[in-house]
Structure formats: C-alpha cells, structure tokens
C-alpha cells in the first residue's frame, strides 16, 4: 500500500523528543525585531462631509497621464456605492448620487494606477487621474489575509507587524494584499466604546500602511463600531460604518488587476432585527444579509467590468448564504471564486460559486494556550496566490514559518511505503530540508519541485520499520527551523495482546447550532480494523454503540465507513472507544478539542464533530472537520 503523508504545524498533543529544544509551531530563531510593533504610519485620508447636502448630480473626468500627454479614460466605472456609471470616450461621467451616499469613487481599471485618492467626498464636480501601470499584469502574486482581529492585545499588534515585514520581504513582491474581514476585534453588538474603535482602527491602518503595496480591506462584523451612533442609529443601513469610512474609505468597492475584477462585499447591517441573549441581556447583532440597494450595486458593478475580466469576490463568508440570488448574479457575471474568512480554518468548497477560506492571521491572539493554531490545527497565517492569465494557484503560509509539512492530516493511519512531503519558502543559498523519525537521526530530504516561492522536498519511509502506534515525524531546515507531525502507524501485523473487550460509540447527525447536520441517505457499513461490525440506517439520526471483542483489538485501531452510495455522507460526533474504563479518542480529534477549548472555553469541548463521506452540505466550520478514517491507539495490557 502506498500513501502520501500530509504534514503541517501541530503544537497540540504531540510528543516531541527531548533532544529537540524547540516549541512546535515556532521558529527556532526569533530575532528581537520580530517581536517589535511597527510605529504607526498614519495617512491623511478623504473623509465624508457629514451633514452636507448631497449634490443633485455629480460630474467629472477621469484622465490618463501618459508620456507627457493627458487624455480621457474611456469605460472606467464611477460609483457612489449605490449605482455605477462609466466614462465616455473623453473620460467624462455623470451620476445622480443616492441620498445616503458618502463618497464618489472609481474602480481601478486593469493596467492603470490611480494617482492620489481613488475615493473622494461628495461634491458637484469630482475628477480622478490615472497613469499606466509600470508592471505587467498577466502574471503576478497577491496575498489573501483574513481575521487579523487587531485590538489592545499586544500579540495582535506584534503579529500584524510581523505579517507586514514578511510580505514586504517576499521576492518578487506581491502586487497587493486583500483582507477579507474582521480587521479588528470590536464587539459585534456595538457595545465597544467609540474611543476603543478609534484606537484599534489607528493601530490597524498604522501598521498595514507599512506595506510596500496597496492593501484592500473588507469590514466584517467585528470591525463595525459605535462611533456616530446618533447620526447613524440602528435601523440605518450605514450604522457602524463611519470609522471604517474615515480610515479606509467605501465599504463596497471594486478594483481590477490583470484579468480579475475584485469586488469587496460587506454584508453586516445593524438593523435592530436580530436579538441574541448574552449574559442575561438582549443584544442586537448584525443582520448578515446584503440589502437590496447593495445587491443592485453589485450587479451594476460586475456588469460594467472591463470586457474579458472575470470576478473574484472578497467577503467575510460565503455570499451564497449572505446575498440574495448571488448564484444567479455569479452566473451572469462570471464569478469564479470567493475569498472568505470568519471561521478561522483553511478550507475550500466547490459550490455553484466556489469559495476558499483563508485561515486566520489571528489564530487565537486572545488565548496563548491555543499556541498560535487555528481550530483546524492550521497555524495562524495567510494565503499567497499566483495569477497567470486566468489561472490561480495558491498555498497557505504560517506566520513566521518557512518550513511546512504539506501532505496527510494529523493522526492519519499509515501503512507500507509512504511519501512524506514538505516545502521551504524562499530558501536561502545552500539551505535544504532533512527529516527524522526519532528526533536524533537526521536524513536529507530530496528536492522534487520548485513551485512559486517554495522548494518542495520528499522523503520515503517504509512503515514496517516503525513501531505500531503513534509516531512523530520531524522536519527541519538546515538553518534550524523545525516542524513536527504526529501520525499513526497501522501496519496491523501484530496479533491481539488484549484480554478485555471495548465499546465503540458515536452519534450520527448529532445536533448543534453550528452547521447543517445530516444522516446518510443510504446504508453505511461500520468497519473496525477492516471488519464490518455493524450498519448505520439511512435517514436516521441517533447514537450508535458497537461491542469490539478483545480478539479484534490492536495497538493501532482504525475506524472507517463504507457507503452504499459513494456520493453519500453524514455528520458525526466525536467517535469514542471505551477500553478498561478509559475514553480513547482519535489523535486529531484530541488536538482539535484542545485548541477549540483554548478558543472558546471548556463549554466548547463537545461542540460540533466531523463530516464523513462526500455529501454537501454540511460545510467545514471551526466545529466540523472532514475526516473519513479515525484511529484509536491502545497500550498493550497483561
């Protein structure tokens, strides 16, 4: 049997050999500058003219400055955030602004840069200027970061500063950065003071302004503030947005680069329609659905994109769940991908409009017990994309990490000849990777590829040479950065050494409020170490329990499911093997539970579970991860 070993940065539930003096998930070397917070670099940005009368009509010209000449830019989109118009052959536009508008602004057209400000306060006449871009836009790199959750917490400021330094150091440099939401960590119910909102915004933009390239930010429900609530009270669709406007500009906008038309969508509205009890109080939370006037703006904006471009959206979460008829909108306007965040996991969903979640730069700033991990055990980090024409490729980079294990998940059962893969980001001259199975004996890995920004390495291991049960695989760069991954060797070459039976239990379609739950549509066989021990009924959500005789137990035990319909699937609670009055769980399950409680406290330990099979929904969330095989490692008993 051949297998490909996945590895990534795991800092929970690992057994690290004593010879390795490194904290898993951290670089071995940590220069003092990496813990320093960048000085705030604040810029004067256009501000809304609060209280001023909205002009009956706004007109102006979009001009291109090139080779010492000035000409009109035709076909450039100009908007007030409610309706969109385009410039004529002379670059002239006219627009009747909405009474709620606060800015007039343009969409950066492919191949051009906007001089000075791309958005301006409302006035009867507003002009914009462009110049030709000095770099080719057929091939480029951009960064998708999300959930930065900047606050008074020093870890958030150190982490964001480190992110900025890392992105600036990439060669070639990315052309721009997109943050898909939850820029700050303000309270969703707008109970944070205006002063705290102001301070957090200053920290966020003051650090992000050190980027050597443009940055574009989606608001997100943790970014809305209680500033100017008297002027924009609950029920007004602009409620909570003024601090964002004053620091970052319009909260619905688009820009083009190469063949992609990027659209930023903020679906959080404080309309006074969603009450949630918190600590004995009823608090008003955002209504997370794009309202009709902004859905109409999206249609107009996408329809007026440059011919030949396709659409990529950036939003806090999947717009199919948060924007009416987004699927229809996407079909008409060639929307090919959504960049999303919010759930702090790295995942991809193929729906009518695919989306990819970008993990979380924050990981869990607020609780160091999470050890810089997201709820799916990904390190805190960000996605890096390379675009070539209309093709996109990507990889996830852990913050402060250049070494990553990139092939099977934590706790995967392995048997036979196994290929282990890892990559090294922007390798220094003479730098390479090596691996160890015991933390003492290191062997070189073999370079097999050089994808963008990375060098990919491989090692081949025969599991017959490794003891049955848990095994920690170690990878390090020759410059000293170490990563580890715990997996399960399940050769099943041993005979049973156990004299007590065990009980296997789990619940199918277990209920909670975190995702759509599902029972199987057809019969499912339950296999324990390859033997059928029972059957799950179709269309039934209930708890199951199976007795496992001692003769069927091994040191490394594997639970799997065989669906009558290969496209079937189900949601499953954490499976448990009870043996000699002890609860034995899957290694990945244990690690996820520890990180989950670090994020949300002990009450979260039983939240969610797993998604088994191929059915959709449910989708992956912080509380539900896809997994088809589970392992239970036992110690031999007399």
Image: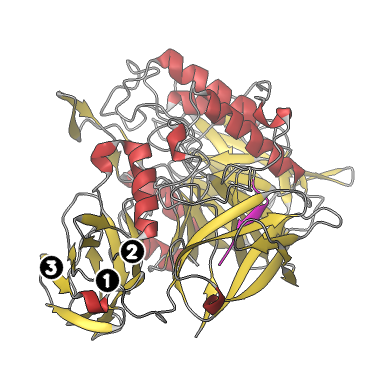
Extent of the magenta region? 401-407
Q: Residue at x 32, y 37 (%)?
A: 600
Residue 35 within the segment the image draws in magenta: no
Where residue 60 sits: x, y (%)? 63, 36
Q: Which mark is residue 498?
A: 1
Residue situated in front as seen by the camera: 380 or 479:
479
- In the rendered image, residue 52, in percent from the top left (x then y), is placed at 46, 18
Residue under numbered circle 3: 544
Q: Secondary structure at mark 3?
A: strand
Of circles 1 and 2, which is in front?
A: 1
Mark 2 Cα within 10 Å, few/some/many (few <14, many 20+)? some
Instruction: Give the Cα distance between marks 1 and 2.
Output: 9 Å
Please, what secondary structure does the residue beneath circle 2 have?
loop
Question: What residue is rendered at 30% in x and 80% in y?
Answer: 567
Instruction: Identify the residue at the far front of this view.
Output: 638
State yes or no: discs 3 and 2 in contact (Cβ < 8 Å). no
Above-or-below relation of 45 to 542:
above
């Amino acid at each position: 049997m051949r297998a490909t070993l996945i590895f990534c940065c795991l800092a929970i539930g690992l057994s690290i050999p004593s010879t390795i003096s490194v904290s898993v998930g951290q670089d071995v070397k940590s220069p003092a500058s990496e813990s320093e917070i960048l000085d705030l670099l604040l810029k004067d940005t256009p501000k809304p003219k609060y209280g001023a009368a909205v002009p009956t009509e706004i007109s102006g010209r979009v001009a291109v400055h090139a080779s010492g000449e000035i000409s009109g830019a035709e076909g450039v989109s100009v908007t007030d955030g409610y309706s969109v118009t385009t410039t004529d052959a002379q670059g002239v536009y006219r627009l009747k602004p909405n009474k709620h508008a606060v800015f007039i602004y343009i969409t950066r057209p492919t191949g051009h840069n906007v001089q000075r400000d791309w958005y301006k306060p409302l006035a009867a006449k507003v002009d914009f200027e462009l110049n030709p871009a000095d770099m080719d836009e057929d091939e480029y790199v951009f960064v998708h970061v999300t959930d930065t959750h900047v606050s008074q917490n020093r870890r958030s400021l150190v982490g964001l500063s480190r992110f900025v330094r890392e992105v600036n150091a990439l060669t070639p440099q990315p052309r721009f950065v997109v943050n898909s939401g939850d820029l700050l960590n303000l309270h969703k119910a707008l109970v944070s003071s205006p002063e705290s909102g102001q301070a957090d915004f200053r920290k966020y933009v003051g650090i992000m302004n050190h980027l050597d390239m443009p940055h574009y930010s989606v608001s997100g429900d943790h970014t809305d503030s209680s500033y100017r609530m008297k002027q924009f009270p609950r029920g007004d669709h602009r409620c909570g947005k003024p601090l964002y406007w004053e620091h970052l500009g319009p909260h619905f906008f688009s820009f083009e680069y190469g063949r992609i038309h990027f659209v930023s969508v903020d679906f959080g509205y404080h309309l006074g329609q969603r009450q949630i009890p918190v600590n004995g109080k009823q608090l008003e939370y955002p209504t997370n659905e794009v309202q009709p006037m902004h859905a109409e703006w999206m249609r107009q904006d996408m329809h007026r994109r440059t011919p030949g471009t396709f659409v990529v959206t950036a939003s806090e979460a999947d717009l199919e769940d948060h924007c009416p008829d987004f699927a229809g909108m996407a079909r008409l306007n060639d929307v090919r991908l959504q960049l999303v965040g919010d759930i702090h996991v790295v995942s991809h969903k193929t729906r009518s409009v695919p989306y990819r979640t970008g993990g979380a730069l924050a990981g869990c700033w607020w609780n160091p017990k999470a050890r810089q991990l997201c709820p799916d055990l990904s390190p805190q980090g960000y996605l890096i994309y390379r675009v070539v024409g209309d093709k996109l490729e990507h990889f996830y980079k852990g913050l402060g990490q250049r070494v990553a294990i990139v092939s099977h998940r934590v706790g995967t059962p392995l048997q036979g000849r196994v290929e282990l893969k890892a990559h090294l980001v922007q390798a220094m001259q003479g730098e390479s990777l090596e691996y160890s199975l015991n933390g003492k004996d290191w062997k070189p890995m073999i370079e097999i590829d050089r994808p963008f920004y990375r060098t990919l390495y491989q090692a081949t291991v025969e599991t017959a040479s490794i003891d049955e049960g848990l095994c920690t695989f170690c990878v390090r760069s020759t410059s000293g950065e170490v990563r580890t991954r715990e997996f399960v060797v399940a050769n099943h070459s041993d005979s049973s050494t156990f004299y007590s039976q065990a009980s296997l239990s789990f619940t199918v379609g277990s209920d909670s409020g975190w995702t759509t739950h599902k029972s199987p549509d057809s019969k499912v066989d339950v296999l324990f170490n390859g033997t059928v021990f029972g059957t799950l009924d179709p269309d039934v959500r209930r708890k199951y329990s199976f007795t496992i005789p001692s003769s069927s137990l091994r040191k490394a035990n594997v639970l799997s499911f065989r669906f009558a319909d290969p496209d079937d699937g189900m949601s499953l609670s954490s499976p448990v093997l009870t043996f000699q009055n002890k609860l034995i769980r899957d290694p990945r399950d244990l690690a996820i539970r520890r990180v989950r409680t670090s994020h949300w406290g002990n009450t979260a330990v039983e939240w969610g579970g797993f998604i088994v099979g191929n059915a959709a929904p449910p989708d992956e969330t912080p509380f539900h991860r896809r997994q088809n095989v589970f392992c239970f490692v036992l110690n031999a008993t007399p």
